Amino acid sequence: MILPLFKHELRFCLFPTFIIAAVVILYTCVIIGMYDPELGESLALMRDAMPELFAAFGMADQGTTLLEFMINYLYGFLLVALPLVLVAVLSSRLVARHIERGSISYLLAQPVGRTRLMLSQASVLVFCLVLLVAVLTAFELACAQALFPGELDASDLVAVNAATFCLWLFLSGMCWAGACALPNVSAARWAGVALCTLFVLAQMLSGVGDELSWIGDVTPLALFDPLGVASGSMGALAGAAALGVSGAVLFALGTIAFERRDLSV
């Protein structure tokens, strides 16, 4: 890794990371605050009135514990879509933007190999995701302890967030591979994001009705089962590990593709 380059890029990537983190924290505090019997009854009435809509956003079941409630209302959609926005912004900033503006020529002119250069860029993206999951976990624990002391199992929450990070790593690997491998700048910027968005939409459609339930099973996001992780299911843990390993492989493939690219700079 090239430390000066890492620090330089991190300064520009921290701002969008903090923006997404602030939105995530806001939604998290609101959702945790909704863990109340009276509000729970209101949510149940809304869910009964619009079951397809709630199912599409992964909110079909309120759950019986605070963690299950959080998983159903946060991890089914919000903590997938919002980090995907961050990943799209950062992968574009770290790869496609440099190629589009021609600044990649200055980076390549340095006495370092392309692999080391891209590993430094990828480290910025992964660091921002680590920062996001750390901030999310800290605020979830703090908010739950302030509002409902003793209701949230910290170890189960950490396990769920570790699985969520594996999902984020997979999504960022998809975007990274597209940004590094595709010669057209527009395609490099949006191909991975579009594919990830397609996966998210397929998961949403699979919850609308039994006729479409099979759609969610054919996407990689089917491996993400936070409720299973919270209950200690080995299948859910294996699925999360598979997502994390797949993300690392995609990062490696993208870096190799960039190493072999013929850049007109």
Image (cartoon, rainbow, N blue to C red):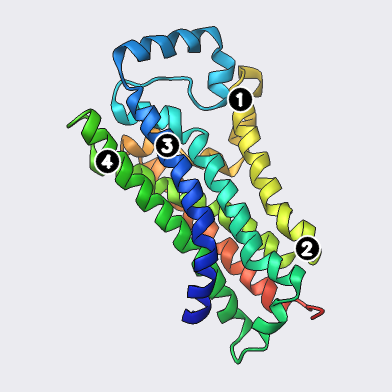
Please state which of residues 165 and 81 is positioned toward the viewer in this rendering: 81
Q: Nearer the viewer, mark 3 or mark 2?
A: 3
Task: Give percent across and percent down for residue 167.
Answer: 49, 48
Residue under pointer 1: 213
The residue sitting at 68% across, 73% down in the picture is: 258
Residue under pointer 2: 185
Q: Secondary structure at mark 4?
A: helix
Please state which of residues 134 and 241 is positioned toward the viewer in this rendering: 134
Which numbered dot is residue 141? 4
Q: Earlier in the sequence, mark 2 or mark 1?
A: 2
- Badge 1 vs badge 3, beta-carbon distance below 8 Å: no
Q: Amino acid at mark 3?
A: Leu
Q: Amino acid at mark 1?
A: Ser
Please state which of residues 161 and 83 is positioned toward the viewer in this rendering: 83
101 over 70 or under it: above or below: below
229 over 151 or under it: above or below: below
Q: Amino acid at mark 2?
A: Val
Q: Nearer the viewer, mark 1 or mark 3?
A: 3
